[in-house]
Amino acid sequence: MMIYRTHKPAFPLDNFIEVFVYFDDVRLSHNFDRFLPNGDTEILIDFHDTPQFIYDNNSLKEIQACHHVWASGLRTEPITIPSGNKSEMMVISFKKGMAASFFPFPMDEIADSVVDADLVWGSDFGLLRERLLETKDIDLRFKLVEEFLVTKVRSQLEINPCVEFALNEMRLRPDEINIGRMNEKIGYSQKHFTHLFQSQVGVTPKSFLKIMRFQKAIAEIEKAKSIDWGRISQDCGFYDQSHFINSFKNFSGFTPEQYAQIQTNYQNYVPVG
């Protein structure tokens, strides 16, 4: 029987983590998803021993194996992953740009990368996984993960307020933001703030803003009954329709028109095989 459950962590984790997702025995008609850049960083716990793979976006050949627990950094390009068929996993999904307190290195070191957890945190997450495997109670599993994370990082849960301000501005109104004017409000030099933002978020402010504009475009496409491409490109903050098309294809591998024809189960997960 398919199970899909979500859990919102309590304070103080709720300021940094969007949601925990648990799923088991998902049944889909396709085997691969292209995951599109959305500004998220995740930690994934796999309850099965067989590895999960990352695939080449074009050939769908296996290019990386992931075992037991791994971290997936913020992406600036699509990645092809298993659709989740017959898997049992828990996903820790961080709020955009808010994962830095949980990692022992600057976030740009994991951008566009997937890394096994033992290379990041040693055996800690492996031991947590063993504890989770001792129970089938999903609520208890959520509780154990939450307690583990609070214990591990309570003393370092922080983010620079200027970075947080910039994240919120770009996330909420990407079509209106100008990086130069935002820098003037913040008061740092552009070079200093870019370094600060990149180390805490994973990419430069300019790159993050492009991702947020792309995300706004996806949302506009999915809710539109009839699509005016010129209006969408303008409403999402792109310089012109040509820039919109090129940016969209870089982030997804599809033109906007191709994407609009694809039926997706979840935003940012596109079936490709």
Image (spheres, rainbow, N blue to C red):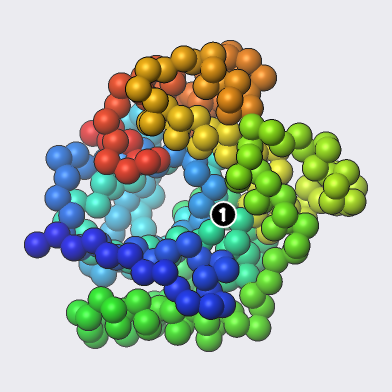
Viewer-closest of 181 and 45: 181
Residue 217: x percent and y percent?
50, 30
Residue 210 % position (x, y):
62, 34
- The answer to whether residue 113 is left or right of residue 25 is right
In the displayed structure, would residue 233 be above or below residue 200? above
**Residue identified by numbered label 1:** 96
- Say if residue 61 shows up in the picture: no
What residue is drawn where x is 60% and y is 82%? 154
Q: Nearer the viewer, residue 260 or 118?
A: 260
Q: Is residue 4 left or right of residue 74?
A: left
Q: Position of residue 170 (x, y in %)?
A: 65, 43
Q: What's the amino acid at mark 1?
A: Lys
User: Can residue 105 be seen in this snapshot?
Assistant: yes
Secondary structure type for disc 1? loop
Instruction: Left or right? Give the position of 252 relative to 103.
Output: left
Residue at the (83%, 44%) spot, across then down: 183
- 62, 1: nearer the viewer: 1
- Which residue is pictured at 14% across the width and 50% down the height? 27
Residue shown at 58% from the left, 25% from the top: 235
Q: Quadrant of residue 270?
A: top left
The residue carrying pointer 1 sits among few (fewer than 14), some (14 to 19) or many (20 or more) residues within 10 Å by Cα, namely many
